[in-house]
Image (spheres, rainbow, N blue to C red):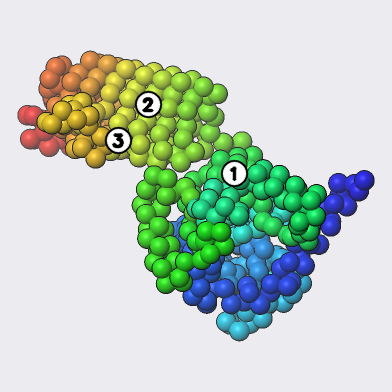
């Protein structure tokens, strides 16, 4: 039997030969209008849009892995970024250099032949690593992704794409549907034994993964997923019979639009899958208890700690140095700033924004539904679209005591303090002290938490505060 390393070498040679043969295709694919090219065009468009949203300063260093014909490298260089382009195929490297020279960015693009399984760059070199359509062709994907993570700077970003095992074009085509592969193997094997079918020649194929498998691959390299999207919904065929190109393009555009809006099911069945993930700072990764439930689509900042039985829903953003104690619930899309402390069983519902330095005591709830009914006037169970969400906003440094209820749409001002057990039905001014049911303004407090005197002075730290007369009499 051949050794594992020899098999890997042979597999890599077969992949390299495949791309050498298809070099002309990669030169033309971003300019073509056929349905099959939309996949690659969508992938590049998403990657460049995400790159723009990062706001990298000019001169930031980028590694373009599997640079192909150089379109992505040139596009990055045009944005003022310094690009190292790596590809295992010498013909592709030459194409990158030619493309960069033709577009006048040769001084910003350095193209070399290399293997992503063993990159030559030093650890922590790059601000951004781009690898579009690469992982599906690696003989050892985990090693390749780990190398990309290694050369990223702490806090750097990787944009990676792969082939979706549950892509709609595969699911609709019985000849390629992955779930029908066992049946196809049995049928083909039987026909070959009967002499009715010849063994097919070896074909180099991309490795497709489920979305969950791809996410695990990324996270296994120490990268934290920030956002993701499927893309490319064609070409659509059935028993290798294709739709008309015009109809295929219209369908793809419609499906991509639905996926971009997060439409259930559709958002998960694009032919490709692209992920933006960030490398944590050294020894600063967030700590998440084994029993906590943190959505892969949530973002948790450096050094934050999420304790047992806490739940953080999709789209939520938790800042750095936060503490979410036992049983804390963070709803969809909630925004939590830096250095926020939420004690046991705090519930923060959709629409809420907690600024830096907020404290919320145990068993408090920040509500969002102004019409809290289980059913509509017609007796039907209410769904998310039936809600009238008005989130609570808690400004910097404010504190909410234990067992409080904050009604929908309330704003708690900077460094305000809400006494334990209060039911807050009105906005609280900056530095305001409120308590009771309903909560009433009882005075004002300093940043240090001490109650201010009538002149706005703090007897503990001697800070002087200018208070609005209207607030003083609130």
Q: Is residue 36 left or right of residue 438?
A: right
Which of labels 2 and 1 is toward the front?
Answer: 1
Residue 362 visible in rendering = yes
Residue 316 falls in which quadrant of the image? Answer: top left
Query: At numbered mark 3, what does the secondary structure look like: helix, strand or loop?
Result: loop
Percent of width and height locating residue 9 = 84, 56
**Residue 442 at x, y = what percent?**
14, 21
Q: Decide: few, some or many residues near mark 1? Use Cα within 10 Å; few <14, some 14-19, many ≥20.
A: few
- In three-dimensional space, the C-alpha distance between marks 2 and 3, rounded to whole angstroms, equals 10 Å
* Residue 292 to residue 150: above or below: above
Residue at the image position 14 percent from the left and 21 percent from the top: 439
How many tags in the picture? Answer: 3
- Which label is found at residue 73? none
Q: Nearer the viewer, residue 381 or 144?
A: 381
The mark that comes first in sequence, 1 or 3, is 1
CB-based contact (under 8 Å), mark 1 and mark 3? no
Q: Quadrant of residue 121?
A: bottom right
Residue 437 lies left or right of residue 325; in this view the side is: left
Q: Which residue is mark 3?
A: 350
Mark toward the start of the polypeptide (2 vs 3):
2
- Residue beneath disc 1: 179
Measured along the vertical axis of the image, is residue 316 above or below residue 149? above
Quote the CA–CA distance across marks 1 and 3.
38 Å
Residue shown at 58% from the left, 82% from the top = 104
């Amino acid at each position: 039997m051949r050794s594992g390393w020899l098999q890997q070498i042979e597999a890599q040679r077969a992949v390299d030969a495949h791309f050498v043969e298809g070099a002309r295709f990669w030169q033309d694919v971003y300019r073509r209008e056929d349905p099959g090219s939309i996949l690659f065009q969508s992938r590049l468009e998403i990657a460049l849009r995400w790159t723009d949203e990062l706001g990298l300063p000019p001169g930031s260093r980028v590694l373009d892995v599997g640079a192909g014909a150089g379109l992505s490298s040139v596009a990055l260089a045009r944005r003022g970024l310094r690009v190292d382009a790596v590809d295992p195929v010498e013909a592709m490297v030459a194409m990158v250099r030619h493309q960069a020279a033709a577009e006048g960015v040769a001084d910003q693009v350095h193209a070399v032949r290399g293997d992503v399984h063993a990159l030559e760059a030093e650890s922590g070199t790059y601000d951004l690593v781009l690898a579009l359509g690469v992982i599906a062709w690696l003989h050892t994907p985990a090693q390749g992704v780990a190398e990309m993570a290694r050369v990223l700077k702490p806090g750097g970003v990787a944009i990676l794409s792969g082939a979706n095992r549950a892509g709609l074009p595969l699911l609709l085509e019985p000849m390629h549907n992955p779930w029908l592969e066992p049946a196809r193997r049995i049928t083909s094997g039987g026909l070959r034994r009967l002499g009715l079918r010849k063994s097919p020649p070896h074909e180099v194929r991309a490795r497709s993964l489920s979305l969950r498998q791809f996410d695990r691959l990324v996270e296994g390299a120490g990268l934290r997923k920030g956002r993701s999207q499927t893309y490319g919904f064609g070409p659509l065929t059935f028993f290798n019979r294709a739709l008309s190109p015009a109809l295929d393009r219209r369908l793809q555009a419609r499906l991509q639009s639905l996926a971009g809006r997060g439409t259930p099911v559709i958002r998960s069945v694009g032919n490709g899958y692209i992920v933006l993930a960030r490398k944590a700072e050294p020894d600063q990764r967030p700590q998440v208890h084994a029993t906590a439930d943190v959505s892969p689509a949530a973002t948790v900042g450096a050094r934050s700690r999420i304790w047992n039985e806490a739940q953080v829903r999709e789209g939520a953003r938790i800042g750095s140095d936060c503490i979410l104690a036992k049983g804390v619930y963070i709803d969809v899309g909630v925004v939590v700033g830096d250095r926020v402390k939420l004690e046991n069983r705090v519930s923060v519902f959709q629409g809420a924004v907690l600024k830096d330095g907020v404290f919320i005591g145990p068993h408090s709830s920040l509500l969002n539904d102004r019409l809290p009914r289980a059913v509509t006037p017609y007796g039907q169970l209410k769904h998310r679209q039936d809600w009238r969400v008005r989130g609570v906003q808690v400004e910097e440094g404010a504190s909410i005591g234990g067992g409080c209820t904050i009604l929908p749409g309330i704003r708690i001002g900077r460094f305000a303090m809400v006494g334990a057990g209060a039911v807050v039905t009105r906005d609280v001014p900056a530095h305001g002290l409120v308590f009771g049911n309903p909560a009433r303004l009882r005075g004002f407090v300093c940043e240090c938490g001490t109650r201010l005197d009538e002149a706005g002075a703090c007897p503990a730290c001697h800070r002087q505060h200018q208070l609005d007369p209207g607030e003083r009499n609130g």
